[in-house]
Amino acid sequence: MQPVASVIIPCYNVEPYLVSALESLQAQTFSDFEIIAIDDGSTDGTAALLANFAARETRLQVVSQTNRGVSAARNKGLDLARGRYVFFVDPDDTAHPEMLSKGISQLEKTGADCCIFAYRRRFGDQGEWQLMPLQADYTYASNTDIVNGFFPHMFGYSDAQARIWGRRGNWRAGREEGSVCRCVYRAETLQRANVRFDETIVLYEDAMFNCEFLLSAQSMTCLPEPLYDYTVRSQGAVTANNRSRALFTNKLRLLAKRQDLDERTGGRLWPLYSASCVFSALEMLHALFCTNVKLSEGLPLLRNYLACPAVRRALASFPLPTRRPLAALLLLLLRAIYRA
């Protein structure tokens, strides 16, 4: 029979953590759900662990594929999902026992397409848990309200936030973590809009998935309770990719994705991410000298990024950071070189 919910877990070499994630799902107060675990070409004991767990947990379906990345694994899970509601859980995190019951209840009560909830975060297995509350009440009854109310918290950084950054103020105030693991989605809306993860993006793919989904949503709701526990690991994908050539290629692909979504709204999203273009350029420039990225690899990619008309337009409008003299100098240099 069709389960009420589907929980998708992408798995790649997560043998030390996976049992805790799976047991947190077994401990859910809501029971009518399926677990779809995608083994993304693991080379450790992940596959054997999944097989052993599936032997005693009938709700767990295990699918194996060659290593293609977390987005491809999640997309495979979406293709297989049969539930009316869709959740994502990362294999090195855990879900609150009432995550499914409260998330599903909120969508059924409100009829909304998506529900986002608060979460807890810690750094490493021994770190202190920190509550990450919602930054606003995300209760919206129209797509216009969603775009105007929620997108400024996730889609990118604006020139107004750049001015705060330039004055060394709290420019990240009001930002929301884009993780899909802190959301529940109505499957009907996902299917109707055919929303999938962009498999060319390796960082911030969650945020882009959420924004693309919400461009097709007509209503949104939220829950203030922390229903998900996220552990930040030093060997995680974000850390590794920020120190490699992937940082540069990802910036190019992320820019292309933002431009695509912006075009769908007739340019309404541009003010929300114009400063992100400049921050990304400065981050790439920093990576050329402060990481293990080879100059011969990174520099051509940086040039490609700076040659984009949208980036040059962003450079021209970006407010000069008066209290960040090095950044101001680099910004003036980039403007001079590319005549933005």
Image: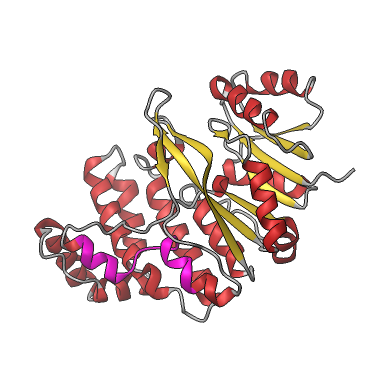
Q: Nearer the viewer, residue 223 or 11?
A: 223
Residue shown at the point (73%, 21%) measured from the top left: 53
Give how far across and how far down residue 141 sits, in percent: 61, 72
The quadrant holding residue 155 is bottom left
Above/below status of 50 relative to 232: above
Residue shown at the point (38%, 44%) measured from the top left: 245
Q: Quadrant of the image for the C terminus? A: bottom left
Give how far across and how far down residue 30 sits, in percent: 73, 38
In the shown orientation, is residue 139 left or right of residue 3?
left
Give how far across and how far down residue 123 sits, in percent: 38, 31
In the shown orientation, is residue 337 left or right of residue 201?
left
Q: Quadrant of the image for the N terminus? A: top right
Numbered range of the magenta stretch: 148-165
In the shown orientation, is residue 152 left or right of residue 279?
right
Above/below status of 74 relative to 207: above
The number of numbered badges drawn on the structure is 0
The reply to whether the magenta stretch includes residue 161 is: yes
Give how far across and how far down residue 163 sits, in percent: 21, 67
The quadrant holding residue 331 is bottom left
What's the colour scheme? secondary structure
